[in-house]
Amino acid sequence: MRIALRVLGVGLLVVTGCSESREEPAQEARGGAGGTENGEAGGGDEGGAGAAGEGGAGAAGAAGATQLCDGAPLDCDDCPTLAQLREGCADASSTDCGGTMVGPLRSGPTAFTYCYDGAGELIGRIVVDTDVGSRSVEGSDCVAEGTSEPLCDGGPRSIIGAESEAIAISQFNFFSGGYLFERRLDQLSIEQLELAEAIRVVPPTGDCWSDATGMSITVTAGDEQQLYEANEFTGTCGGEQTLVDFEAVSALLATAHCLSSKGYDSSSAEKAPSIEPDSGCWHGLFNSHGDAPSWWFIADIPSAGDYQVTIADCGDRTLQLDLFEEDATTELASTTGENECPVLAYTFAAPGRYPLRLEMLSGSYAGDFYLGLDSVPPP
């Protein structure tokens, strides 16, 4: 079942921006009128508390702003939380705009505006399309025409919307290599769909370091594609990408059991890892420059029928695919790609665990490429 998304119905603060100095007061705080001798409260005054009278306390005035809100974006190393926005812009005005919090934040050299829900959780970054005069929030269905229409009126925070059709994730780590995961939403299990819908846009932390695990996520709806990034440090490294929750993407990928190109030993049939058809995985393959290795896998075929092994992004590599009986010596099928990536199709008469060998015969390309195993639907 799909995850139920909360509909928000509280007010909105529009934070227009804050001066860079947290030391400069926005206005002089003035005390309220003093209390009377018989204990009546003193009158409040904007900016400060009323002075205490003999027998009675002065009424509190409005809190003095600690900082100007003059349209300049808040400048800090880490993306501010909603609480920091409120603290830095005490004179932010209230308006009805779909129960979200909106405020400009600075990430690296570029200032953006973000939508927050009524609980202070980030929905996503606001994007203005000047050509058509509309505003939208990346990672949600929040869209508004012009500058006056309410934005994010109960819109979902998931990157998966009502019109979404497919998701593709490319995962990479310098040390363990990478792999691809691609599925139409109607091919996902119930668990996988719920995990995909749980992926949300998150603000950057500002941290960044090399060689950490990173992911590129593409959500397709018709001819439109939304692009997102995720990484262990949740940092933009000075870029302008929209970040999503790394742990949420990892939870979805964990259900697929894709092989990362440097994360397994496939040097022989005895050590070969198992792969299953229709998992959504393009398992990673890697060769160094000048190498011509072989890779072994065990194709775990669940039922009789037509299946095919496909290689992607093989570059100029000349590759040969060989399929064997379970003894790993009796050949069932073989194909060699000539100036293109090979595809091996085979009709299995019975389920079983069938050894599969990929050999690189020639080529100058080095790095990652990919192998997929899928069933072939009947015509």
Image (spheres, grey):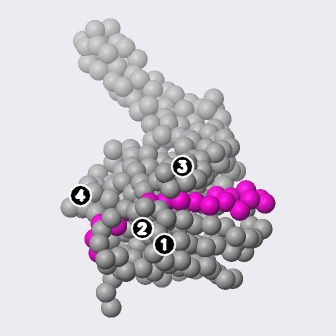
User: Which residue sits at x=36%, y=54%?
Assistant: 255
The picture places residue 220, in percent across and down from the top left corner, at 45, 73
* Relative depth, front residue between 314 and 84: 314
The picture places residue 20, in percent across and down from the top left corner, at 65, 39
Q: Nearer the viewer, mark 3 or mark 2?
A: 2
Question: Which quadrant holds the N terminus?
Answer: bottom left
Against 251, residue 41 (above or below) is above
User: First in sequence: mark 1 or mark 2?
Assistant: 2
Give the Cα distance between marks 1 and 4: 51 Å
Q: Is residue 212 visible?
A: yes
Q: Secondary structure at mark 3?
A: loop
In this figure, which residue is indicated by the disc labeled 2?
325
* Relative depth, front residue between 162 and 291: 291
Q: Secondary structure at mark 2?
A: loop
User: Which residue sits at x=59%, y=47%?
Assistant: 176
Q: Which residues are magenta?
A: 286-304
What amino acid is at disc 1?
Answer: Glu
Labels in figure, total: 4
User: Which residue sits at x=56%, y=72%?
Assistant: 321
